[in-house]
Amino acid sequence: MKLSRPVRLAIVGLFLVPALASAQIPAASTSPAPAAVDDTSAASVAPASSAPAPTTTAAPFDPDAATASYMARLSPEARAKSDAYFEGGYWLLVWDFLVGLLLAWLFLGTGLSRGLRDRFERMTRFRWLQTALYAASYIAIATLVLLPWSAYEGYFREHQYGMSNQDFGAWFGEQMKELAIGLVLGTLAATAIYAVLRRAPRTWWLWGALVMIGLAMFAVAIAPVYLEPVFNDFKPLAESPLKHEILSLARAQGIPATDVYEFDASKQTKRMSAHVSGLLGTTQISMNDNLMNRGSHEEVKAVLGHEMGHYVLNHVYKGITFIGILIVAGFAFVRWSFEKLRASSAARWGIRDVGDVAGMPLLLFLLSAYFFVLTPVDNTITRTMEAEADNYGLNASREPDGFAQAALHLSEYRKMEPGPVEEWLFYDHPSGWHRIHRAMVWKAEHVGDADIAAYDAAHPAGAAGAAVSP
């Protein structure tokens, strides 16, 4: 479950790394966790609430053949393009890490970090204000320095593979919005965390981690109401039988949502997505207009059933718990490594102790290095919850062909059949092949049910399901 972009931004801002491109902060998805986001109109299907009892005359159904039939819908050219895009992301992880190392050197090796600290100490005697001024300056400078790399990753490369609908002006405008949010949240987070570092010099790593976790939960809670609308317009989904089916499905799962929202992601991307986001009373069901315009009726229900699974299975809280454990361990690692590096380079870098704000670039880089190494662990946590949500969504929505169609749409930018080691290292979701196969296994167990049989009768392609719109 991936977090929506504003939620990721909020958490990244709270980690003070909106400018540190190498930080691999786990997304308990939509993250593990909070805001689940997964990328994903045709014949009407019987509502999930009226799932019939299985019959004893189910037609033979081969999940492997059905999976192969779906996979055959992808042309070699399309698969080669998506494989190249996704595999290029492996190298981006490495380059992001190296860019983060360069950024840390820029602040520490050139004396910039020490100079900023000295300047702000002369400006005010209040340490909290010195920290706030330094943090704001760090975020602004780092964002400017990394702008060319961000443009390559987020604009030029996306256009190269046909995934973006933005012109450069619109993309740059969103970068400025992200900078503004990062300045506010990042500065507040830095002030709070450095207050802990100074008041608890021996146990700062534990209390600092707890503060970080609390701030991340706060970001997740406010994202649907205050952050996501900064980037997209949300409006209630137009009245339709599909909307009523989605709300009925939500009520049946015990989700306290009274409406379904649609947001205009098509102005930014061609990707299809949806999420059930929020925390502590801010729960909201949202889907982007790409999913509504490109997805079939059954596909929309399948995707929303998956997202509801994240909510019902408490992936928000489980994800925060897993992330929290990693954060605490990460701060313990930083406590050990920070002092060793500071002691050996104190003269060059001018860092007095861990409570010295001039050491922020080092602290952030060590934290990002820790998460970079733990990328497979982070991915495995997320991928496991995604698989759980897949299973839940299949049983809730009863739309196996919708799930398969969603997986084919994901193939536009995800490699469908990775090797086992490759999937373990780099995939935060089950691969497309595994998701289609899982859906077809579920269908094989229910192929004689009235609603599944009715769907197959309305779609003579049988196991291959309805055509996936381009």
Image (cartoon, rainbow, N blue to C red):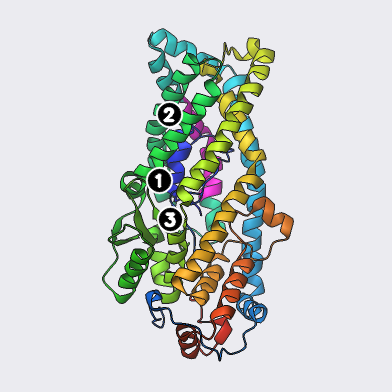
- Kindly identify the residue that appears in the image at 46 percent across and 44 percent down: 8
Snapshot quadrant of residue 268: bottom left
Upstream in sequence: badge 1 or badge 3: 1
Q: Is residue 303 above or below residue 227?
A: below
Residue 202 in percent (x, y) is at: 56, 16
Q: Nearer the viewer, residue 294 or 440?
A: 440
Which residue, given by chain and number where applicable, does mark 1 sit on?
Answer: 174
Mark 2, Cα crowd under 10 Å, few <14 / some 14-19 / many 20+, is: many
Name the residue rendered at 38%, 11% in the picture: 126
Magenta span covers which residues?
138-154
Membership of 147 in magenta stretch: yes
Work out whether mark 2 precedes mark 3 in sequence or the reverse, and give the earlier one.
2
Name the residue rendered at 63%, 34% in the picture.
370
Label 3 sits on residue = 311
Marks 2 and 3: CB-CB under 8 Å? Answer: no
Along the polypeptide, which appears first: circle 1 or circle 2?
1
Q: Main secondary structure of the magenta part?
A: helix
Camera-side residue of 73 and 51: 51
Mark 2 vs mark 3, foreground winner is 3
The answer to whether residue 288 is magenta is: no
Q: Residues within 10 Å of mark 1 (few under 14, many from 20)?
A: some
**Residue that carries the numbered disc 2 in the rendered image:** 189
The answer to which of 332 and 292 lies nearer the viewer is: 332
Any part of residue 200 in sight: yes
Q: CA distance from mark 2 to mark 3?
A: 27 Å
